[in-house]
Amino acid sequence: MNGKEFIKAVDLIVKEKGIDREIVFEAMELALATAYKKNFNSLTNSKILIDRVTGDIKVFSYKTVVPDEMAEDDYLDDEDFDEEDGEGEEREEFNPNYHITLTEARKENKALNIGDTIDTEVTPKDFGRVAASTAKQVIVQKIREAERNSIMGEFGDKQDELMVGTVALEDVDNYFIDLGRSNGILPKKECIPGEKVEMGHQIKVYVSKVDNSGKGLFILLSRCHYGFLKRLFELEIPEINDGSVLLYSVARDAGSRSKVAVYSESSNIDPIGACIGEKRTRISRIIDELSGEKIDLVKYDKDPAVFIANALAPAKNLHVIITDPKKQESIVVVDDENFSLAIGRKGQNARLASKLTHYKIDIKSIEQAREMGINFKN
């Protein structure tokens, strides 16, 4: 095995796969140690050392320095170990292939102590040929493992984040999105209803799940998740990104309508105006990304009654009663003119308002409220 060619191959793998150089060398040394024992019937402890600069490979046999008494016949029968009861610390048996006594070791080097090792080079002449033919499979496996760990390191913290990828493949149920060093799966049911996804086009996606527990890295993507809309607001609205406008909650019926609650702790900032932007430029970019999905911007209020009234827009003239703060339940009394607006088509407005405020909202007409004995001022 040519050392220079080996170093070039390692450097190429490191560059292409983004793997730590030392991991490749350690994998190679492990593979060669296995190859040496298999092909040369080694009865001694052995290790492989690869020069990180020249690529030279050397095989070393080593023995561990042990106390002199370990070589004595009665070493295993002393009072520290009771074979019948199995008590005490089990002693390792002396093996001249693996061990050398302290006295013998110090004949070679007086500085040696118990636990040190004595290395002897035993590199076979034809080891390069054997190494090349037997270590390849193990090396490939180790590189795959290292590459998988490297990719997981890159994508492991991407869950709940927004990413941009390229639509690469399609099957009956899914789109496969090229995210760079890995592909993500975008189920067609997680696409915005009615949108057209084209092969080769770039697309924004929300990472809803990252899982490395199976055979490979699994990245699940979505464009319907409420988190997708949340990340779009953070991307497009500088005031949300810098914290001067805060996003309280998001409720979404993908492809149809969403409600987004925002507020600011500064009286000088209009949170809804900041999200809309001059000539509606900011909100328009988000709506375009959502294929025309309608967005209701709602001002959050610490008073749940006010917040619920805001969330039920475009309905007006609402009377909100918090019936159980702990269970987060409320009744909203609405006049006939705003009743259908408060509920919305197929109950959508009331449903989204409930998700947004985290309150159960029971909408009643004035007549129904009076029948329940609810008194209020119109």
Image (cartoon, grey):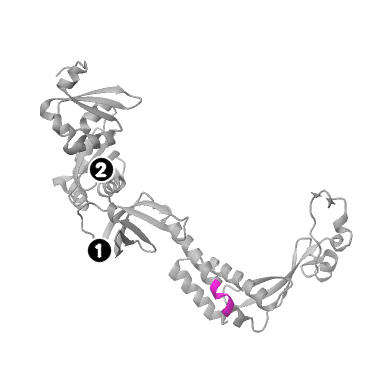
Q: Which numbered dot is residue 201?
A: 1
Residue at 25% x, 49% y is 236
Q: State the CA–CA distance, disc 1 to disc 2.
A: 25 Å
Residue at 19% x, 45% y is 256
- Name the spot of residue 149 as percent of width and height, x first: 48, 60
Q: Is residue 11 left or right of residue 358?
A: right
Q: Amino acid at mark 2?
A: Arg
Does the magenta stretch mainly form a helix, a strand or a loop? helix
Q: Secondary structure at mark 2?
A: strand
Q: 133 above or below 92?
A: below
Q: 160 above or below 23?
A: above
The answer to if 236 sits in the magenta stretch is: no
Nearer the camera: disc 1 or disc 2: 2
Q: Which numbered dot is residue 115?
A: none
Is residue 269 in view? no
Q: Write the start and end of the magenta stretch as one range.
A: 132-137
Q: Which numbered dot is residue 252?
A: 2
Residue at 35% x, 61% y is 179
Out of 205 and 282, give the one closest to the viewer.
205
